[in-house]
Image (cartoon, coloured by chain):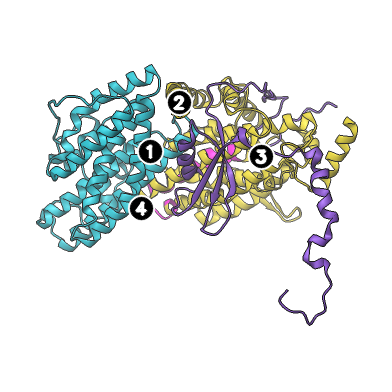
Chain colours: A purple, B cyan, C yellow
Amino acid sequence: MSYSIIKLYYGDYGEAKNGAADISTNNTPKEEWPLWEIFIRSKQGLDHKHAGSLHAADAAMAIENARDVYTRRMEGVSIWAVESKYIHASVPEEAGSLYDPANDKAYRHPTFYDLPDEVKYM
Amino acid sequence: MTTLNKINYLLHLADNALIIGHRCSEWCGHGPVLEQDIAISNIALDYIGQARNFYQYAAEIINSENDPSLGFVLPATEDSLAYLRDTPDFKNNLIVELPNGDWAVTTLRLFLFSTYQFYLYNQLVNDADTQLSAIAEKSLKEVTYHLRWSGDWVIRLGDGTEESKLKIEKAIEYLWPYTGEMFINNDDSISSDWNKKLSSIFHDATLTIPAKSWMQEGGLKGIHTEHLGYILAEMQYLQRAYPNSEW
Amino acid sequence: MEKNMETIFQDKIDKEIRIEPKDWMPEKYRQTLIRQISQHAHSEIIGMLPEGNWITRAPSLKRKAILIAKVQDEAGHGLYLYSAAETLGISRDEMYDQLHSGKAKYSSIFNYPTLSWADMGVVGWLVDGAAIMNQVPLCRSSFGPYARAMVRVCKEESFHQRQGFEILYVLSKGTEAQRKMAQDAINRWWWPSIMMFGPKDDESPNSIQSMKWKIKRFSNDELRQKFIDVCAEQVKVLGFTLPDKDLKWNEERGHYDFGEINWDEFWQVIAGNGPCNKERLDARKKAWADGEWVRAAATAHAAKKAAKRTAA
């Protein structure tokens, strides 16, 4: 397949007119600060939620930067920073075997059980 | 404290915040890495906010005095105080007006100055003037963060590479003579707390505190370095070129 | 197998299921996205410069604070977008290299100078306005990380456009000199702004592939027309004019007709011949080069600290 894409979007003028189409060599330069994933608890009682990522030299800097970047320094929040390379992810091709079985086990879901209307608060 | 002394003191606090905020804002778009660009812009924003609070309060007092002999444009506003006073009227410490230099000068200056502000605001929080203490309380939270952020950088640069160590040592040499002025008219406790904090951070940064030496001063009396004139020329240009306009 | 994957892929796209970084995707899709997202990120970062140019000269403390916050937001947008591109397997340093070497492009609008305070108003109103119109559809981009980054970006962008319009509104109520300043800024920025939507559709036949992949969702001309229709009305509120003598309402089309765009200028600016191409790129290169020892120091210190922890 060959497409030449002339203009896609804001700041992007495509390959035909000198736009870069260069793709990663996957050679992350060694001196680059590592990438961190940032999780933020926005309010007491809630779970930490993935907010985004950023680069920092160490964990302390990652947490400090997260306040500047992702909370604009709101107070009373809790921040987790995890170096991205330590995140393990399930592989999508296996997603079928990991998640599909659960779909069959409808008995895990409360609505599976048809109870008489008189039974309240269950 | 006489009313004029009070006004001048508020202007001193405001000018310090404005000018160091101005210097920090010069980094916006030019920082060493995107995340730090955002951080120093946040600090600039905090300082502009502090300056506005102090100017607004000063303007309130000036307007209630309503006395042209005090020498202020009437009615005074935060903007008339920031934009329509000239170099000799500014009462900031010399250290805040010095050029940014490199990242070492910028972060070290911020560390030296925000440490001083931290202990000063800690006192002002208990001031009998409730309006002043309220501003100090809000500012103290911000300065606590500035102090931590800049202190971390001093440690990183001191205990980083040979090159960074050389640069921060040069920065110390450059800034040191301007540190004495911060303690004029202040309790001794501020300077001793400041020295303690400095020792602890310099220790972690493997840096040496310079020996006692001649200290520059003059800012409080309106006798500045050559740099302030350029800051004001740039900052005030629109207000001066188009007088009496709304923006 | 490959064919099959491609069918599954297109099927997901057709069903509006987002593609996530670890999902299979055609190589060309990945490449296109890296180019598109990184160049969008570069645009945000370069875009900080023309506005940053006025931070130290902002005419009031309130305007100064707003402007710093706005330029800082752009840094944040750049960061979100670089992060989205990084999920596709390219590092931020590599993207910077492409920008600094001139291989990667960025929005050509930022190669125009900001000459007066009114430019801060016009950049907000027209440039951010055009950007938002381009960006809102991207919140539904087929690539998950890009779509999510854009949701965040768009939330923050609407404040940018409003503050820009407000600057102009205040100038429009001001002195004769201020009104002149504002009209002059509109005259300079109008044509470059409508060029931001890119070449005419009949000159970019292959953005069809991007539409099919739902990377891009509206054509250049559709968006441009929508933008012109909106601005032609908004400029009346300000009491200023847009510098196009052919601009007039076409009852039949239900749109404004407008004059011929100077595409030669557009391609010249992209090719590097805009008024500020060199300054903008040099400023970024300088910031990056000057920051090198700083980044190295932080890395070295982090390593020393980690070693100490291990030893302890």
Neighbour tally class for label 2: few under 14, some 14-19, many 20 plus, Cα within 10 Å:
few
Tell me the kind of residue under disc 3.
Answer: Phe
The magenta stretch spans which residues? C171-193
Q: CA distance from mark 4 to mark 3?
A: 34 Å
Mark before the other along the chain sequence, 2 or 3: 3
Look at mark 1 in the image and give the residue it sits on.
Answer: B149
Looking at the rendered structure, which numbered label has been put on residue B194? none
Label 4 element class:
loop
Near-viewer residue (B52 or C297): C297
Task: Determine contact: label 1, label 2, CB under 8 Å.
Answer: no
Look at mark 2 in the image and give the residue it sits on.
Answer: C311
Q: Nearer the viewer, mark 1 or mark 3?
A: 1
Q: Quadrant of residue A10?
A: top right
Neighbour tally class for label 3: few under 14, some 14-19, many 20 plus, Cα within 10 Å:
many
Residue B47 visible in the picture: no
Look at mark 4 in the image and give the residue it sits on.
Answer: B246
| Left or right: A85 in relation to B210 | right
The residue at 37%/17% (across/down) is B162
How far across and how far down the image is residue B121, in percent? 25, 49
Tally the numbered discs.
4
Look at mark 3 in the image and give the residue it sits on.
Answer: C197
The residue at 29%/33% (across/down) is B109
